[in-house]
Image: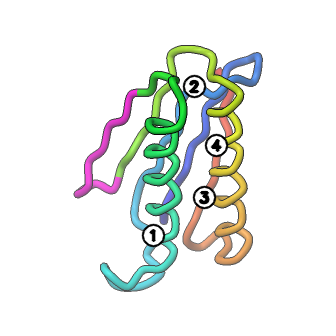
């Protein structure tokens, strides 16, 4: 199962997004749920880096299936829009494939 944890501050600013685990929908290389989550996550990171001036720290461990984005400062409107788009995409995958392969958590700090 893939777990996506979106952490926001008490005033609703994005602080961290962690994508962890492999979905287990199919064998490695054939897992469309894992591939969809990976594409959305990596595209969001690339978009934040290329299309905004916001600072983010990205860490990843491919073997463990972990990728994180961390934000120290309040994000620009453009970055917030990209992250809302990410959430929209992730929620669409969740609605299609359900609780068996994907878990989404929202946390407040």
- For disc 2, the marked residue is 15
Which tag is nearer the camera, tag 4 or tag 3? 4
Q: Secondary structure at mark 1?
A: helix
- Drawn side of residue 51 relative to residue 77, left or right: left
Residue nearest the observer in this picture, 1 or 80: 80
Per the image, is 28 magenta?
no
**Quadrant position of the C terminus in the picture:** top right
- For disc 1, the marked residue is 34
Residue 27 point in image, percent of width and height: 34, 84
Q: Which residues are magenta?
A: 57-65
> Splitting the image into 4 quarters, where does residue 21 fall?
bottom left
Q: Are marks 3 and 1 in contact (CB under 8 Å)?
A: no
Q: Secondary structure at mark 3?
A: strand
Which tag is nearer the camera, tag 2 or tag 3? 2
Which numbered disc, 2 or 4, marks the residue that appears first in the sequence?
2
Which numbered disc, 3 or 1, marks the residue that appears first in the sequence?
1
Q: State whether residue 9 is above or below residue 26.
A: above
Residue at 53% across / 37% down in the picture?
51
- For disc 3, the marked residue is 103
Query: How would you rate the neighbour count of disc 2 (Cα within 10 Å): few for under 14, some for 14-19, many for 20 or more?
Result: many
Q: State whether residue 27 is above or below residue 57.
A: below
> Splitting the image into 4 quarters, where does residue 56 fall?
top left
Q: Are marks 1 and 4 in contact (CB under 8 Å)?
A: no
């Amino acid at each position: 199962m893939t777990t996506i944890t979106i952490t926001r501050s008490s005033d609703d600013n994005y602080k961290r997004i962690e994508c962890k685990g492999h979905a287990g929908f199919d064998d490695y290389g054939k897992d469309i749920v894992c591939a969809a989550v990976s594409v959305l996550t990596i595209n969001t990171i690339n978009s934040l880096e290329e299309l905004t001036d916001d600072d983010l720290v990205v860490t990843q461990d491919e073997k463990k299936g972990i990728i994180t984005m961390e934000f120290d400062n309040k994000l620009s409107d453009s970055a917030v829009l990209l992250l809302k788009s990410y959430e929209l995409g992730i929620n669409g995958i969740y609605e299609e494939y359900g609780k068996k392969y994907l878990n989404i958590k929202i946390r407040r700090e």
